[in-house]
Image (spheres, rainbow, N blue to C red):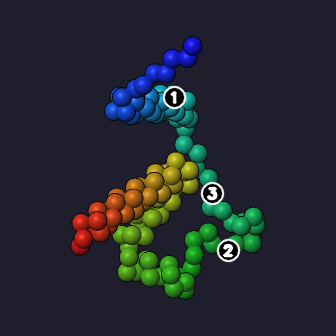
Amino acid sequence: MMVDAVVDPTLAASMVLAGAGLSLLASAALYYLLKSKSIRVTGPYLSGEGEDVVGEISPGVGSLYYGFMRRFARSLYRLLTERIHTGSLHGWFMFISSWLGFLVLLTILVLVLMLMGW
């Protein structure tokens, strides 16, 4: 004889959400316990060439893009070179995930405004 159990959908959804939250919490705790405390900083990537091939590591003043960045967008250039482009994979991931979060929030806002008929 087989017995079928019926679970309230609200209770089932709450149980699944609680299980997902606990697994996320356990994964985050495990990640922070096991992650390395040292930060690895590497040199600039030179396309596989030796340093003698490339004269200067930073681009020259004649480059239009970097000339614009240094002259007109000095604060943005400083932010890019000092905070974002650190050589650390963890820093890159935090930058990309923050932009992704911003884009997701913007998308949700646009979808809500479209559903409201704006």
Q: Where does residue 90 sit, x and y in percent of width and height? A: 52, 48
2 or 1: mark nearer the eye: 1
Mark closer to the chain start, 2 or 1: 1
Question: SS at mark 1?
Answer: helix
Q: Where does residue 5 sit, x and y in percent of width and height? A: 45, 21
Q: Distance between the residues labelled 3 and 2?
A: 15 Å
Which circle marks residue 70 in the picture?
Answer: none
* Residue at figure coordinates x 40%, y 62% from the top left: 103
Which circle marks residue 55 in the picture?
Answer: 2
Q: For the residue marked with disc 3, what is the amino acid? A: Gly
Question: SS at mark 3?
Answer: loop
Out of 28 and 52, give the one closest to the viewer.
Answer: 28
Q: For the residue marked with disc 2, what is the amino acid? A: Gly
Which circle marks residue 30 in the picture?
Answer: 1
Q: Distance between the residues labelled 3 and 1?
A: 30 Å
Res 22 seen here: no
* Residue at figure coordinates x 43%, y 70% from the top left: 77
* Residue at figure coordinates x 37%, y 80% from the top left: 72
| Image: 91 above or below 23 | below
Which circle marks residue 43 in the picture?
Answer: 3
